[in-house]
Image (tube, grey):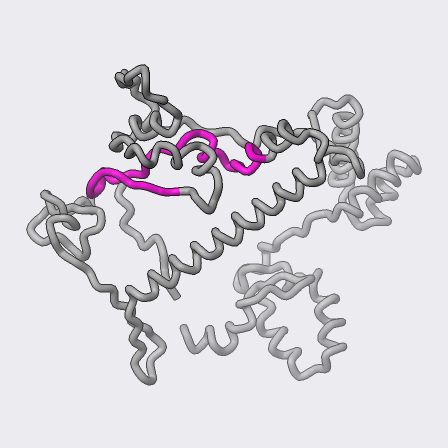
Amino acid sequence: MFDWLNGPGADLKHHTPGSTNYVTQLKNRRAGDEASESSRRDSAEQDSHSPAARQPFPLNPLFVSEPILGEELCKEIYKRVVIQKKSVRSVSVELRVDMRRVGAVVRLMELERRMEKEEMVPTTPLGEKGEPQPVHESINDLPVHRLTDPQIFYPVSESRQFTRVDAGRVFSAAPALERGEEATVNVESLIAPETRRFEKVGKGAEEHQVLLPADARIPHPQLIALERDKIRNSSERRENMDRYHERLKRADELEQERKVLAKAKAERKLTRIQPEDSRFEFRFRDVVVSKETTGSDGRGHSAPGHRYGVPTYDRKKGQVKIPRKVEV
């Protein structure tokens, strides 16, 4: 199989523009290698509509794949039938399209134009040059977090300032902030990518991230800073947008740095060994088998290998028993 994939089957790895990529055409393609480049291009254009080009299964010549009509051809059919008042029969002969398909194209395009004229389907237009883009949908929706489902009555003294940061820590069952951190850890510091912090609580499979306030969990937290700039400096529109784009650029740079550091950290924990004259590469990662990794029942989510002596869940309903990822 690998000899065929590296030999004749190598032509099927990539799609040939303008034609299908069926096994039936493999013999014709390899025979065309002896011809010149121009003759091969002409033959490819001629063979794109041949029966062999539309036959996916080599041993079943009765099964052929039908091409679809292009957008320009559909518009031309509608133009000749509706605007030029030509008969369906003549249009079918001129454009080599079945009369039933011609009628279907005319009906569908007429229905589309009628729906657009009656504004039956609401559409969001593109904003004119210099005009703001109309709002299509909300882009900062926040789903309900599972940690906020229960109602919690948390007593707080009247002299203490209880913020949304503290509420997220209560929902996450995290300890309260230290007295020195209350002034520095706030909503503004959690929105900024430079000072944003990620903290986890819990042990083993119950470990989860501390719930951040809604302003820091929305998809576009930079818009909050933009709105605050507009309120403070309503007349400085250009400066506000410049600061907004600068924040976006800085956030993207920090995200790229984080990805590079995470990849380098994962590579340091991985040992790669590739034997000579071998196409395989072995990857080894150091593991630790302890109570913290395996857990009290031997089924810790970070435990390495099989847990001997413990029944597996292979036959349990809903268990994934196939590889989810292949590293090549």
Q: Total number of numbered labels?
A: 0
Identify which residue is drawn at 80% across, 39% down. 129
Q: Left or right? Give the position of 45 relative to 152.
A: right
Q: Which residue lies furthest to the right in this view?
A: 84
Identify the image quadrant of residue 200.
Answer: top left
The stretch in magenta equals 197-225
Q: Left or right? Give the position of 251 relative to 89.
A: left
**Location of residue 263 with respect to 310 vertically, above or below:** below
Q: Which of 301 and 148 lies nearest the eye of the viewer?
A: 148
From the top left corner, tell me how far across and down residue 143 is, in percent.
Answer: 44, 29
Q: Is residue 314 magenta?
A: no
Identify which residue is drawn at 43% across, 44% down. 195
Q: Is residue 218 magenta?
A: yes
Quadrant of the image containing the N terminus: bottom left
**Location of residue 25 with respect to 174 vertically, above or below:** below
Q: Which of 244 and 159 lies nearest the eye of the viewer?
A: 159
Identify which residue is drawn at 71% across, 75% down. 40
Q: Residue furthest left?
A: 309
Quadrant of the image containing the C terminus: bottom left
Identify the image quadrant of residue 242.
Answer: top right
